[in-house]
Amino acid sequence: MADTTTRAGGVRAQAREQMRTAILETARAHLADHGAVGLSLRAVARDVGMVSSAVYRYFPSRDALLTALIIDAYDSLGSAVERAEARVPREDLAGRWRAVAVATRGWARADPHQYALVYGSPVPGYAAPQDTVGPATRVARLLADLLVDIAASDGTRPGDPDREGSTAAVDAAVQPVARYTGGQVPTDLLVRGVMAWTYLFGAVSFELFGQRHQVIAEDHADDFFAEESRRLCVLLGIADD
């Protein structure tokens, strides 16, 4: 009897997970058509083939569905970037940075609607809960680990040889990020790391949302991004000779 009950519970859990996956996949399709602002639980339920009241057993509100989509998007990006970076030898600091940059751009171009969900305009009235923070910081934590390795390397060069350090105010500005590096990264390198991270996502967003249209030739967009990545290596002090 106990085995039968256990099997029945397992079947129910599997069926529930399959339905949850179907709801999320349908919701992603709705994101592509209507954007996050136009996301409707009732419309998603209709396209899944269930009554609208039933969908609330899986997601009690539109915000709960948005949260699940956001977490999945961040985790998908994080996994793609982590896999790419892990394939590069640890001592190849510039190669690791380029892997992060290329994988970030590649993921965004492959799934622009998920990228827009997490890096586009905020959804009016939606406040992301605390459980989105971990997934949201996966790429940032990977870059923080890279900064630690850059700081430990004897072969790095200063990104700005004309300036020996930052002002006290700028030093204070990046202290929140210092907790990700355990105090192992000099403040000036932290500043440059934050700038590189900001530039990376800014460049991807500009490309994805059309701000570079008729600015960068489409057939040379890959070449231009490679040059951007190389110059950010210079900023980080890890440019190839």
Image (cartoon, rainbow, N blue to C red):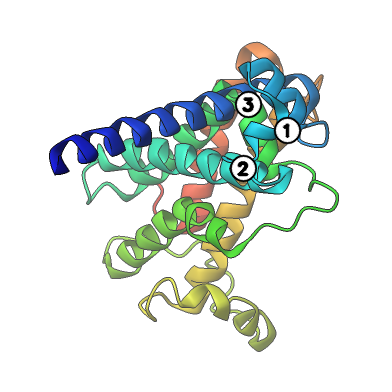
Q: Earlier in the sequence, mark 2 or mark 1?
A: 1
Q: Nearer the viewer, residue 122 or 212?
A: 122
> Local crowd at mark 1 within 10 Å, few (<14), some, or many (≥20)?
many
The vertical placement of 150 against 172, above or below, is: above
Confirm or deny contact between disc 2 and disc 1 (CB under 8 A): yes
> Local crowd at mark 2 within 10 Å, few (<14), some, or many (≥20)?
some
Residue 125 x, y percent position in the rendering: 84, 53
Name the amino acid, label 1. Leu
Q: Is residue 38 left or right of residue 67?
A: right
**Outermost residue toward the bottom in this view:** 168
Confirm or deny contact between disc 3 and disc 1 (CB under 8 A): no
Q: Which residue is mark 3?
A: 28
Residue 167 x, y percent position in the rendering: 65, 84
Q: Which mark is residue 60?
A: none
Q: Is residue 205 left or right of residue 182?
A: right
Helix, strand or loop at label 1? It is: helix
Q: Which residue is mark 2?
A: 59
**Outermost residue toward the top in this view:** 219
Going 63% across and 61% down the picture, which residue do you hit? 129
Q: Which residue is mark 1?
A: 41
